[in-house]
Image (cartoon, rainbow, N blue to C red):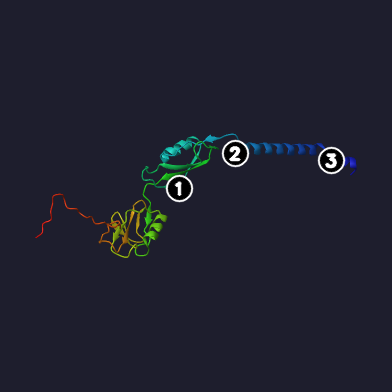
Amino acid sequence: MSLEEFKNKLFGSYVRWNLLAMLLVGIALCVGLWVWMVQYTMHGESVDVPEVKGMMISDAEYALEKLDLVTVVVDSAYVRSQPAGIVLEQKPAPGSKVKSGREIYLTINQKQTPMNTIPDIAGNCSRREAEARLKALGFKIGPMEFVPGDPDWVLALKVNGREVYAGERVPSDAPVTLVIGNTDYGSGVDEFGDSLDSEILEPMDGYEEEIF
């Protein structure tokens, strides 16, 4: 094959049409990819996150769905003063600009009081240690009760006036009473472990003690 015939074959109409077709296909792919990316990322489109904190969860879901936002309940807490099912927290914060379809994370108020398990404290630790352990576990400490026994030693635990034992589950917001030993209890010490100063009564004016 001569050089001239090779050039004619290489740059013939068939090859030129194939090259043109490949170019058009490449352009079409690039345009299609660009359109898909614009739609996927919603370039230039944003939604202001509404404030749903304080709403019931059903109302919050409706408000978010109207803006094409997705409700996701990620946590729950317990606030006695708030009704069950109310939104306590939200992320992102109200007013944030997000894309349509963005997930909005909510924390809601649960229906029941969470329960805590009584630890093995009675008869095993001092008052200071017991207070630290109970607070670390989320318990509330109520007024203490003093009875005869080893001084400053926890002899028992009470919740709502009833003695409770290790492993028992009680409401986390119920105050726990520590029953503390006190060797001076009953001899000039009140129920809180404070000394009672005896009062000296002065005779009333005009009163003379009779001597028999």
Alpha-carbon distance for marks 3 and 2? 47 Å
The spot of residue 10 in percent (x, y) is 83, 41
How far apart marks 1 and 3 lie (CA) works out to 72 Å
Q: Nearer the viewer, residue 141 or 29?
A: 141
Q: Position of residue 211 (x, y in %)?
A: 10, 59
Indicate the quadrant where residue 130 lies.
Answer: bottom left
- Closer to the eye: label 3 or 2: 2
Q: Is residue 61 or residue 139 the one in the foreground?
A: 139
Q: Residues within 10 Å of mark 1 (few under 14, many from 20)?
A: few
Q: Is residue 56 or residue 131 the one in the foreground? A: 131
Label pair 1/3, CB-CB below 8 angstroms: no
Indicate whether 86 appears above or below 162: above
Mark 2 vs mark 1: give the one in front.
Answer: 1
Contact flag, marks 2 and 1 (Cβ < 8 Å): no
Q: Quadrant of the C terminus?
A: bottom left
Q: Which residue has dot 1 on it?
A: 75
Please state which amino acid type lies under the numbered disc 3: Lys
Q: CA distance from mark 2 to mark 1?
A: 28 Å
Mark 1, secondary structure of its residue: strand
Direction from residue 19 to residue 33 in the image, left or right: left
Element at badge 2?
helix
What's the residue type where badge 2 is placed? Answer: Thr
Residue plotted at (40% across, 40% down): 56
Inspect the image, locate mark 1, and give the three-letter code of the amino acid beneath it.
Answer: Asp
Q: Quadrant of residue 99?
A: top right
Mark 2 / mark 1, whichever is N-terminal: 2
Identify the residue at image location x=59%, y=39%: 41
Task: Say which residue label 2 marks.
Answer: 41
Residue 168 in the image, given as x and y percentages of width and height: 34, 59
